[in-house]
Image: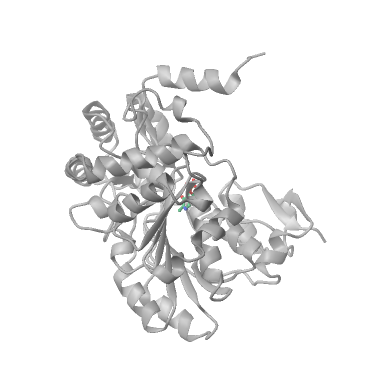
Amino acid sequence: MNSKPLYNRLQQHISLDRSSFHTPGHKCSGFFGSGMLELDLTELPDTDALYEADDVILQTENLLSELFRTKRSLISAGGCSLAIQTMLRIASEKGRKIICARNAHRSAVNAMALLGIEPVWIYPRGQKNGFTGRIYAEDVKQAIDADSRITACYITSPDYYGELCDIGKIAEVCHSRGVLLLVDNAHGSHLGFMENDLHPIHLGADMTACSLHKTLPVLTGGAALNIADEALAENAKSAMSLFGSTSPSYMIMSSIDICTDYFLNGSGTEDYRQCERRVSRIKQLAKEKGIAQPEGICDPLRVTLNTASAGICGTEAQEKYFGEYGIDCEFCDGKNAVMICTPFNSERDMKRLETAIKEMPSGRNEITVNTDLNNAPERVMMLRDAVLSDSEVIDVSDSEGRTAADTACPCPPGVPVIMPGEMITKEVIEIMVASGIKKIRAVRN
Ligand SMILES: Cc1ncc(COP(=O)(O)O)c(C=O)c1O
């Protein structure tokens, strides 16, 4: 029996000396120096308290607000999930009917269920090569105009593949109708430091939830809620305390401080822009090889390769090419491989990635995986009722006519084929089976 199973496995993984193209953004590069563990403190008379911050934590948040040019920024040691819960709680004070992009992360779906928010789904359009596609301002406009009770619009941008929505246009539509724009910017904390500022809070979003740890040098679990309007900040702390642990990690919170200082007083922006230029050469190399990548405005630091266009699925590419050169991808699915790059990747990492790309087969030899649903399944129960119902896990093959109690997604970052409260149809089952989903949680009959 292994006495310290997780600890030993992590040590073993580190000894493999892999190139990390996944989170966290600091890539275990030694950015924080030694001594971080000694900061595992708690709320003491001189260390302030997250939900009642009026001393050093407030100062940390004010510096973060300066960095992101917001009216208010809150730190989270409970990941972006906590920032999303907080954002939805704040928005729910205005109303409980919210337009929501169908590719919402499960933390948002669950938070909506807990808060009694009823989402009105809108679907991303323009899917190509297995990427998610984007939410368009016209669709947001149509959804708002169809229901006068809509008070907010919730979208995810960037999506997992790095595709960015036109936040400026969507914000214009929302604001002209008195609707808040909330953006899950989990994967885009770095976007404001790029050559062209792409951060959604600077393009018109009212609030953004940012998973700092994914793309910036912050310890895993460190995130921020950015707020553009003072009025929305009033009850923000109490909203966060509704969901957050009463023991937020001081290591995580202070790592946010170190990151903020790196940008405000150090070489952060310069390093990220240099990384942007380096990654652009890698993207160009893949393009020259004929490997398809997301089109339109995208996250400059994310390398998303449609390996299917080279005739191999993403998981096979991880095994045969990326894995072979010591690379760990962020994510692979039937069609794509996703790599998160930051300045904390060494030049050796970048060279390894280039070599793997060069080795991949070239020429278009598309493989197809059908995971697209043509119509939204019928909703037969409220989201909240379905999530909180008495439920059971059943075989997908036996689920026709049942009501889903959980989301099911062909590949987690994509568009869920079914949401809680929706009826499971034959078409839904076919897609789940084709995607390898064998079990589903359903409301008990
Ligand atoms: C789009 C999106 N939103 C939210 C989250 C939750 O972020 P965290 O893991 O920081 O809680 C994730 C996590 O992968 C995500 O991909």
- Asked if residue 314 lies left or right of residue 112, the reply is left
The N terminus lies in quadrant: top right
Q: Residue 55: x and y, percent?
A: 42, 48
- Asked if residue 12 lies left or right of residue 304, the reply is right
| x 27%, y 29%: residue | 349
Q: Residue 294: x and y, percent?
A: 31, 54
Q: Residue 11: x and y, percent?
A: 47, 18
The C terminus lies in quadrant: bottom right
Q: Nearer the viewer, residue 1 or 267?
A: 267
Q: Nearer the viewer, residue 98 or 31?
A: 31
Decide: is 249 above or below 366. Answer: above
Task: Specify whether residue 93 is in view.
Answer: yes
Decide: is 307 above or below 15. Answer: below
Q: Nearer the viewer, residue 158 or 90?
A: 90
Decide: is 256 above or below 62. Answer: above
Task: Specify whether residue 311 is in view.
Answer: no
Residue 109: quadrant of the picture: bottom right
- Asked if residue 142 lies left or right of residue 268, the reply is right
| Residue at the farthest right position | 445
Q: Nearer the viewer, residue 411 or 32?
A: 32
| x 53%, y 52%: residue | 51
